[in-house]
Amino acid sequence: MLELDKIYNMDCLDGMKQIPDNYVLITDPPYGINLNLKWLSDMNITHGKKANKSDAKIIQDEKPFDATHLFKFKKRLIFGFPYIYDPNATGWIVWDKQPKIAERTIVTPVEIASTTLRKGFDIFRYMWGGYMRDCFTDEKRYKHPTQKPIKLMHRIIEKFTKENDIIFDPYAGSGTTLVAAKQLNRNFIGFELSKEYCDIAEKRLANAPERLDKWF
């Protein structure tokens, strides 16, 4: 059994063999945002370019993502809808990154997570685009291109999990979900294939306080 409250630099497909399915899965996997899928293009929600391996800043993000290995966890929240379709999802979390003006058109970028942790919809609003960020945070942006704001992960973990839950992120990236879990007094465990991002996450975890008072 792997030790809790750590991130491991390893392939999650190997590491998950040691993870009980009663852990709470919260993750943002490499679901293929650099891959131009025809069905997404037909729905006008593709990113508008064909990708090749040199385009991908996240390991394996240039290929289709098979999420079936994540569905063994009864309690789960997975970012990536509609790229990833969870047939047993009971709810959806919409992260509204706040409106911005582009070519005289108001655009509201969002990311959506499907989940079994609640029924229905929730919308969380945090501005998070380049230098345009929530005015109540001075959170550092790390090199990872899809870093989530810590306040978003705080809200998700606090609202949908309990203190005795163990949070599991098999695609931990720069460690935001794990840091939020630590600050909210949850045990956690994570995997990250990139050594560079794993090192960033380890430093963030080492510097994170054990517990935060509610600040939002």
Image (cartoon, grey):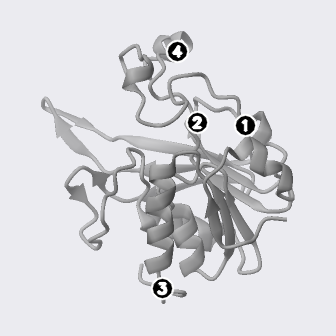
* Inter-mark Cα distance, 3 to 2: 32 Å
Instruction: Please give the label number shown on residue 81.
Output: 2
In the image, what residue occupies the spot 56% across and 22% down? 63
Task: Name the mark nearer the viewer: 4 or 2.
Answer: 4
Position of 48 relative to 110 (above/below): above
- Judging by the rendered image, the residue that carries numbered circle 1 is 86
Is the C-beta separation of discs 3 and 4 under 8 Å?
Answer: no
* Inter-mark Cα distance, 1 to 3: 34 Å
In the image, what residue occupies the spot 42% across and 83% down? 215
Q: Tag 4 or tag 3, which sits nearer the N-term?
A: 4
- Judging by the rendered image, the residue that carries numbered circle 4 is 37
Q: Quadrant of residue 193?
A: top right
Position of 23 relative to 85 (above/below): below
Secondary structure beneath label 1: loop
Is residue 23 in view?
yes
In the rendered image, residue 119, in percent from the top left (x then y), is placed at 72, 54
Q: Which quarter shows the N terminus?
A: bottom right
In the rendered image, residue 94, in percent from the top left (x then y), is placed at 51, 49
Graded by Cα atoms within 10 Å as few (under 14), some (14 to 19) or many (20 or more), the crowding at tag 3 reads few
Type of amino acid under label 3: Pro
Q: Quadrant of residue 49?
A: top left
Graded by Cα atoms within 10 Å as few (under 14), some (14 to 19) or many (20 or more), the crowding at tag 2 reads some
Is the C-beta separation of discs 2 and 1 under 8 Å?
Answer: yes
